[in-house]
Image (cartoon, rainbow, N blue to C red):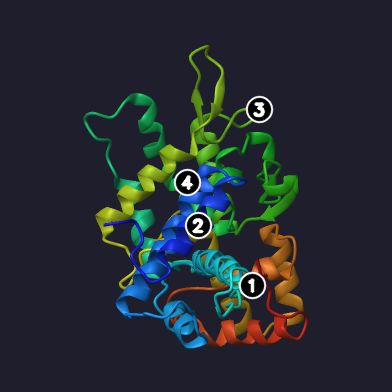
Amino acid sequence: MTEYNSVLADEIVSYLDLKKVIYRPSTIAHEKGHLRHFDQYLCDIQCEDKAVSEQIMTGWQKTITGKSITISHKVTTIQKFTEYLNTVGISAYIPTIPLVRSDYVAYIFSDEEVKSIIALADRMKPMPHEKPDYRDALLYMPMILRILFGCGTRLGETITLKMKNIDLDSGTLILTETKRNKQRIVPMHVSLTAIVSQYCYARGIVGSPERYLFGIQNTDGTEKSIPERRIQLRFSRILSTLGISPEERQWHERGPCLHCCRHSFAIKSFSLAEKKGRKLDDTVPYLSIYLGHENLNETQKYLKFSSEMYPEALQQFSEYTNNIFPEVSYEF
């Protein structure tokens, strides 16, 4: 049995032979997979004519699954193949490349889940086989989670905080290790400020501006921030223990993770402001700046979620942004 078995098998082989002259093997390998899928579809519908009608193309496109960008790549491959077919005298409908949109949908932690996560982090004990430096993640986890949930900061921004980045008098975080190097000042709630203050005094780092809030020792005795991976692994263990996972997660969707703390903060902050009657014109720009976003489009992505917890708030935000700019999408 050959690699391709449809009525267009010879044309597929000839087309790939031409591509091999100018494209890398890795690129050809991806296209082979997409062409095999198309070839199998032609076999399944028992296509006997060396022609690709619009009906055949539409039927094949309905069989494609996966992320938006994956679907676009597959259709692009077949589009190029149909263009080739037309050059060799075979009538073939040329499909339109679908628009690519963000497939990411954040998991929004409920208030009860947040309480359970922090409570478990507070009482977790180290595993007997864990190395001492890995136990640092256990020690730091309760404070890191409170900052992530309470301020909406990114994990990288949080674990690189030094004492000089904390103003305990004003209750603010001065973030310098940020995405796109955009330094920003993040206010904390008074209750979180009190906890951060107690934590810093308990660790004995108050008055030492270069000390990390979440530091570990290098082999030479110097200090560095704890690696993200250690915190991520600890958080995964917490979620697993609590059984927190989306009920109907698709194979290509990301489940709950530390970055979802930031999404949870964003949607809950927006919902709280909306419930208090604040105008969207006031709330949205401030939230965007607070999160360190480039523009309101980026903030809009953070207000996508997988549950129906805040439908009114999301609807109002969508209506607000639609009046400012159209939906962002792009085409290959």
- The image quadrant of residue 8 is bottom left
Classify 10 Å Cα crowding around label 4: few (below 14), some (14-19), many (20 and above). some
What residue sits right under mark 2 in the picture? Answer: 14
Q: Mark 4 or 2 closer to N-term? A: 2
Q: Residue at x 24, y 35 (%)?
A: 127
Side of 103 where 45 appears, left or right: left
Q: Nearer the viewer, mark 4 or mark 2?
A: 2
Mark 3 is on which residue type? Glu
Mark 4 is on which residue type? Met
**Spatial separation of the CA atoms under disc 4 and disc 2:** 61 Å
Q: Nearer the viewer, mark 1 or mark 3?
A: 1
Q: Mark 4 or 1 closer to N-term? A: 4
What percent of the width, then of the height, locates residue 185?
73, 51
Q: Mark 3 and 2 residues: CB-CB less than 8 Å, in contact?
A: no
Q: Mark 4 and 2 residues: CB-CB less than 8 Å, in contact?
A: no
Mark 1 is on which residue type? Gln
**Spatial separation of the CA atoms under disc 2 and disc 1:** 46 Å
Q: Nearer the viewer, mark 4 or mark 1?
A: 1
Side of 189 where 49 appears, left or right: left
Q: Mark 4 or 3 closer to N-term? A: 4
Classify 10 Å Cα crowding around label 2: few (below 14), some (14-19), many (20 and above). few
Considering depth in this image, is 122 or 184 the residue closer to the camera? 184
Please say if 298 is above or below 162: below
Name the image quarter holding the C terminus: bottom right
Name the image quarter holding the N terminus: bottom left
**Spatial separation of the CA atoms under disc 1 and disc 3:** 36 Å
What residue sits right under mark 4 in the picture? Answer: 143
Q: Mark 1 or 3 closer to N-term? A: 3
What residue sits right under mark 3 in the picture? Answer: 210
